[in-house]
Image (cartoon, rainbow, N blue to C red):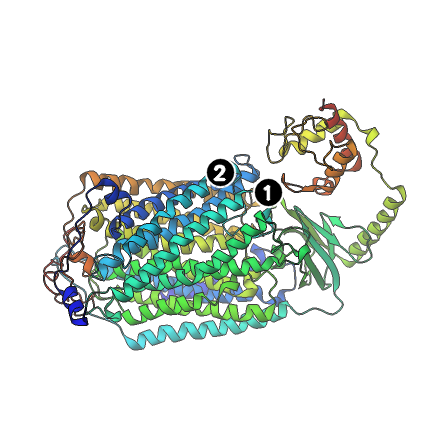
């Protein structure tokens, strides 16, 4: 058993965790080292408990030639042994506790010259805000390599979680409070950012990509975004409902909206209500101020999303809808309404 | 009445109530702890089964990364029902209501629990709670997991009202049972049964009762706040109106951490009974095992925030919770080592019950080790709320609680029914369950460490291979349980008569006929020594010292 334990410990020692799951942020957190340390003592505990159970089960098994009333030895305990297996694990836990505590305080230490980024959880997308950029990102975002990052984390609605597996760190995005997560990306590459705290029906798809790039690429991306913001605000892609095309709206509806909505009466629910006759059906609850909705109201709901008695619907940005998409959808919904 | 008179009444034939005659008083509104135990066993057994079916639905959905077997809404309901049913309606009533009720009073030589009528009332809070919970399926089911963290749980509509009401109702029964058991263990032990002569299952039942009694009140406040938030729009958990989201997590885990010990401590008791019986020797380190049970219970009230290491408590709050959580490894290790040491120098009988207990030793050790890993905050930051956590809890609750419970079923089945189960079928059941249990839950560690969060209806296609393997294993794991049902029905119809003591055990429940008579003990037994003295004469007064302790199965 000692030999098996030793072999396992050697295997664990030479196992490059980095190959199994890349480490793409500051490795001096010591999280992987801590994990390995725990595997070092886990392996012998597992091997010895199972080994002794198997060995005793074979060695002391009741044999047919023994009398039926045979009993084992009357051993009620061995005090020194019991002291050993109380004190040794306790000492081990003290070592582990001290190591963990030191690592823990390191995780909370802010780094000088850090890039401050805000991450806000929404149902069901991550919003990222950079200083110097006017608009937020919903989706892929970029971080420069080897520059400390302070991620300021919160949520706009329910509890989400910010986790990049390759960065090894995770904190919950809690509405009503801001947490800081400190890390330094150390490897160029694309990594998933996933939500791990259950946040509603879109939880499974609440993933995006963080691109860790060189400082030069980052600067290029950043200035490009600055220009885009300027261009966008100049042309002001306003919503033009009159330009909506029914057939295009139908295509978008079937591709996106139909996941949650039927084109049928209000009561024909999937996740949200059925949407036929949305402008005229008296069974349809009056969504706006007690009166039947106007096309502008419906466009507003598609754009801003909905959260209330009927359920929750993500907004246009989360659904990946442009202004013209919204106009097309409203045109299609109008065509399906008496 | 003077103390002497009470003493005489206890020792000689105290008057016996006649057994009830009508079907309703006998089987439905019974006040007999044995019947109530069986009632709990049947209802909680059905709930475990139903919960398992929800788990299989989850596994069907996860065979493909974007499966359409369930909508996300249905998937969320499935894992909510799986967790809720398993914790409150399956496992807790099974280990306290079923095993505690049937076995504990017999083991202390009592005729019933302290408050038999209250015991009946406790049980009858249980079926209505089940109905309330299941009826929510017709009105909009709860769908935010068994933890129901607000604010997301408050978006779910009326389901949360059903959920809080159902769990609250079952909590009333659990609290009353705890009160009942604690009184029973303190006041109704047979003369001569000092605390250090109590069977270890009795120790476990008493400690569990303390946990239930203290912790369930915190759950009640958590449930109540959620109910008020939904029904009366009280802004406990709405930060825009001054609420604090994390408050719920504190109240919930102040109950739910002790609750995982409510789930496992009775199983420690079951294991501590089965091992000496089949090792044919005294349990190793009785006092340290009993003491470690008490210390686990004490520590369990001081570690709740280890479920919240990512919730934003900051380093100085998480630190003590981390240290205390790690400390639990010490008493848990004592138990594992003592059980293993009991096998040394034994005359081992590898019955089905014993195999399940040896399987428990193996799988629970893994669950304990991953528990230490999760206790270390920096490592927890990577592992929290991923499939690693799912693997850990299933190694503890399936590999621990359920393995021990099945062992207990095989062990006490002859006492309850008077008939033996098939050992060969039982051994098949053990090996299939043990193999497919590990095939199901071991890969979950890896898929979690590699980056798959829990509670997701859709996942990154990179994890499809492992998930498919896990799902197939889970279906086979469910299939292995058919053998248990076949065995149970076969035994009821055709099983051989068990006799009072088929395993040659030495605790008091085996000193009376199987199934036990209505009044358990016609005369109150006297106890002279620990029950685990294998090879010595039975330490009980006549006529309870005449049963053969030679295994006869």
Whether discs 1 and 2 lie on one chain: the answer is no
Q: Nearer the viewer, mark 1 or mark 2?
A: 2
Asked if labels 2 and 1 touch by Cβ distance under 8 angstroms, the answer is: no
Residue B333, labelled with which disc? none
Q: Residues within 10 Å of mark 2 (few under 14, many from 20)?
A: some
Instruction: Tell me the residue that label 1 is attached to.
Output: A201
Q: Quadrant of the C terminus of chain A?
A: top right
| Callout 2 secondary element | helix
Residue B527 visible: no
**Residue B324 in picture, x, y percent from top left:** 48, 70
Q: Chain of mark 2?
A: B
**Residue B47 in picture, x, y percent from top left:** 38, 44
Instruction: Tell me the residue that label 2 is attached to.
Output: B137
Left or right for A315, reference B205: right
Q: Quadrant of the N terminus of chain A?
A: bottom left
**Residue B96 in picture, x, y percent from top left:** 34, 55
Q: Is residue A328 above or below residue B532?
A: above
- The residue lying at 22 percent from left, 45 percent from top is B421
Mark count: 2
Q: Chain of mark 1?
A: A
Left or right for A191, reference B494: right
Left or right for B536, reference A236: left
Question: Relative to the observer, which residue lies in front, A110 or A311?
Answer: A311
Question: Relative to the observer, which residue lies in front, A145 or B136?
Answer: B136
């Amino acid at each position: 058993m000692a030999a098996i334990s030793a072999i396992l410990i050697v295997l664990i020692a030479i196992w490059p965790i980095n190959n199994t799951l890349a480490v793409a942020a500051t490795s001096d957190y010591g999280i992987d080292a801590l994990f390995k340390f725990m595997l070092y003592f886990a392996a012998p505990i597992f091997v010895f408990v199972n080994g002794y159970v198997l060995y005793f089960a074979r060695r002391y098994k009741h044999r047919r030639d023994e009398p039926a009333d045979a009993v084992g030895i009357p051993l009620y305990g061995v005090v020194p042994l019991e002291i050993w297996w109380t004190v040794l694990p306790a000492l081990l836990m003290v070592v582990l506790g001290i190591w963990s505590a030191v690592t823990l305080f390191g995780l909370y230490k802010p780094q000088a010259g850090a890039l401050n980024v805000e991450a806000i959880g929404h149902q069901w997308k991550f919003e990222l805000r950079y200083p110097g950029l006017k608009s937020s990102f919903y989706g892929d975002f970029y971080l420069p390599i080897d520059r400390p990052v302070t991620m300021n984390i919160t949520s706009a609605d329910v509890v989400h979680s910010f986790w990049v597996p390759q960065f090894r760190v995770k904190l919950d995005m809690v509405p009503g409070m801001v947490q800081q997560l400190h890390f330094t990306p150390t490897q160029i590459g694309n990594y998933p950012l996933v939500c791990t705290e259950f946040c509603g029906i879109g939880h499974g798809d609440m993933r995006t990509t963080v691109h860790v790039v060189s400082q030069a690429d980052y600067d290029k991306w950043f200035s490009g975004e600055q220009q885009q913001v300027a261009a966008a605000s100049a042309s002001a892609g306003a919503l033009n409902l009159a330009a909506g095309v029914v057939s295009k709206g139908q295509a978008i509806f079937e591709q996106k909206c139909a996941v949650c909505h039927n084109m049928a009466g209000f009561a024909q629910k999937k996740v949200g209500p059925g949407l036929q006759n949305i402008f005229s059906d008296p069974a349809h609850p009056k969504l706006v101020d007690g009166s039947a909705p106007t096309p502008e109201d419906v466009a507003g709901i598609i754009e801003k999303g909905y959260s209330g008695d009927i359920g929750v619907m993500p907004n246009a940005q989360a659904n990946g809808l442009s202004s013209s998409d919204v106009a097309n959808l409203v045109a299609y919904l109008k065509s399906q309404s008496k | 009445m003077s103390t002497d008179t009470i003493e005489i009444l206890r020792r000689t034939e105290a008057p016996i109530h006649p057994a009830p005659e009508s079907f309703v008083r006998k089987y439905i509104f019974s006040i007999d702890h044995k019947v109530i135990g069986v009632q709990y066993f049947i209802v909680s057994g059905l709930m475990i089964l139903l919960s398992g079916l929800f788990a299989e639905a989850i596994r069907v959905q996860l065979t493909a990364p974007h499966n359409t077997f369930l909508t996300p809404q249905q998937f969320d309901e499935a894992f909510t029902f799986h967790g809720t049913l398993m914790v409150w309606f399956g496992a807790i009533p099974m280990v306290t209501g079923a095993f505690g009720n049937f076995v504990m009073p017999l083991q202390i030589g009592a005729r019933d629990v302290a408050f038999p009528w209250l015991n009946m009332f406790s049980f009858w809070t249980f079926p209505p709670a089940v109905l309330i919970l299941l009826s929510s399926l017709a009105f909009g089911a709860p769908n935010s997991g068994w933890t129901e963290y607000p604010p997301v749980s408050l978006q779910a509509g009326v389901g949360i009202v059903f959920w809080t009401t159902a769990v609250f109702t079952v909590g009333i029964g659990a609290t009353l049972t705890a009160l009942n058991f604690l009184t029973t263990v303190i006041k109704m032990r047979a003369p001569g049964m000092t605390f250090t002569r109590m069977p270890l299952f009795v120790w476990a039942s008493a400690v569990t009762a303390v946990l239930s009694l203290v912790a369930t009140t915190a759950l009640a406040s958590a449930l109540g706040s959620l109910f008020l938030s939904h029904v009366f729009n009280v802004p406990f958990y709405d930060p825009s109106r001054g609420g604090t989201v994390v408050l719920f997590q504190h109240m919930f885990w102040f109950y739910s951490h002790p609750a995982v010990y409510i789930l496992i401590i009775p199983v420690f008791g079951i294991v501590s009974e089965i091992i000496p019986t089949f090792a044919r020797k005294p349990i190793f380190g009785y006092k340290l095992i009993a003491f470690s049970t008490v210390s686990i219970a004490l520590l369990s009230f001081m570690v709740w925030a280890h479920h919240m290491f990512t919730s934003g408590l900051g380093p100085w709050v998480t630190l003590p919770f981390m240290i205390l959580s790690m400390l639990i490894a010490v008493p848990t290790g004592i138990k594992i080592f003592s059980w293993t040491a009991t096998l040394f120098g034994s005359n081992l009988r590898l019955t089905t019950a014993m195999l399940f207990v040896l399987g428990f030793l193996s799988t629970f050790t893994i669950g304990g080790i991953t528990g230490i890993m999760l206790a270390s905050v920096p490592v927890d930051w990577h592992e929290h709320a991923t499939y690693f956590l799912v693997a850990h809890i299933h190694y503890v609750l399936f590999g621990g609680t359920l393995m021990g419970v099945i062992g207990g079923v095989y062990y006490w089945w002859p006492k309850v029914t008077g008939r033996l189960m098939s050992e060969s079928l039982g051994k098949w059941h053990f090996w299939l369950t043990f193999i497919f249990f590990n095939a199901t839950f071991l890969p979950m560690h890896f898929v979690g460490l590699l980056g798959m969060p829990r509670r997701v209806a859709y996942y990154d296609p990179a994890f499809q291979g492992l998930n498919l393997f896990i799902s197939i294993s889970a279906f086979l794991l469910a299939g292995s349980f058919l053998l248990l049902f076949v065995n149970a029905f076969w035994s009821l119809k055709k099983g051989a008569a068990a006799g009072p003591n088929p395993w040659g055990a030495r605790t008091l429940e085996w000193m009376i006929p199987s199934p036990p008579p209505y009044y358990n003990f016609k005369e109150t037994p006297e106890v002279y020594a620990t029950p685990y003295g294998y090879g010595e004469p039975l330490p009980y007064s006549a006529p309870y010292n005449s049963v053969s302790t030679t295994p006869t199965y």
